[in-house]
Image: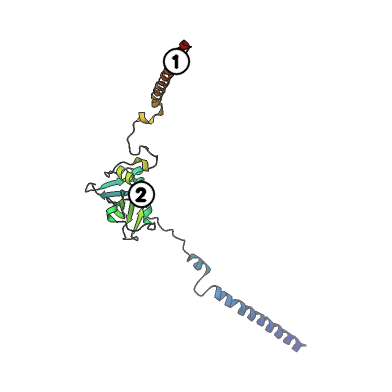
Amino acid sequence: MVVRRAMKRVSTAAGACAIAAVLALGTTPAVAHATPAGQTGIGTASATRPTVKPKPKPQPTTVQITGQNVAAEGITVLQSEDPKLFRMLMDEVGWLASATPQTTTPKAAKLGPKYTVKLLVKETVNQTYELYPLAVGGPRAHRPGSKKVDGWFYGRLSMSESLRLSGVPLKAKPDVVNGGIGGGVGENLSADQLDPATGVPELFGQMRRLILLNGAVLLVILTGLAGMAFLIRRRV
């Protein structure tokens, strides 16, 4: 009896050791694979860095214009001093930086006067373009090949007027800008010219003269008819 009890205890202890060994072998590799030596889960998570957004590119704040019949120091238009005129000039050249060339190089004899437009960020030249507002067949724009690919473009019809309003000595063409023919772009209008009520008396005066003229014509016609009727009645 004593021998049986001893053998039973030995077999029970051996079984417990075997189970413990299997559990240790099954879990240890997984743990080692999930967490390498010398590292912890917290350290791995902390290694991830937040995405940094790129800084926006600086935008031009000054436009400089040089060219034929322009003073040697050129014309300078500041965004802070004249935002409307600055925006007009930017509309003429701002799209050229990323545009695909539209036409081949025109003949020099058909280009007319050239005006160089430089866009400055603070005091540094950022972009340079050449404008030909009087070119045969319509305005042309040239993007010199420095940082960008050299290319020629059809310019906006408002190019001449935008340059003129900046101070370039060109003939006025207010009909090619927003506002239609006779839009008066660039003209200094008084308050009386802008007030629609000031033209009412003149309008009534013109209508009065028109009515009087029509009445006079009608009176002459009636007088002639009356005279003809009188003569016919006498002969009858």
Image-quadrant location for residue 150: bottom left
Looking at the rendered structure, the kind of residue marked 2 is: Glu
Residue tagged by mark 1?
228
Q: Residue at x 28, y 49 (%)?
A: 65
Residue at the top extreme, as displayed? 234
Above/below status of 16 relative to 77: below
C-alpha gap between disc 1 and disc 2: 71 Å
Nearest to viewer (mark 1 / mark 2): 1
Query: Within 10 angstroms of label 2, few (less than 14), some, or many (20 or more) residues?
Result: many
**Secondary structure under the numbered disc 1 in the rendered image:** helix
- The answer to whether residue 121 of the structure is visible from this angle is no
Residue tagged by mark 2?
92
- Percent across and percent down for residue 63 are 31, 49
Drawn side of residue 186 relative to residue 234, left or right: left
**Secondary structure under the numbered disc 2 in the rendered image:** helix
Q: Residue at x 38, y 31 (%)?
A: 194
- 137 vs 144, nearest the viewer: 137
- 227 vs 211, nearest the viewer: 227
Query: Within 10 angstroms of label 1, few (less than 14), some, or many (20 or more) residues?
Result: few
- Percent across and percent down for residue 231 are 44, 13
- Percent across and percent down for residue 169 are 26, 44
- The answer to whether residue 199 of the structure is visible from this angle is yes
Q: Residue at x 69, y 82 (%)?
A: 15
- 144 vs 139, nearest the viewer: 139
Tag of residue 67: none
Q: Does label 1 or label 2 sit earlier along the sequence?
A: 2
Above/below status of 100 relative to 188: below
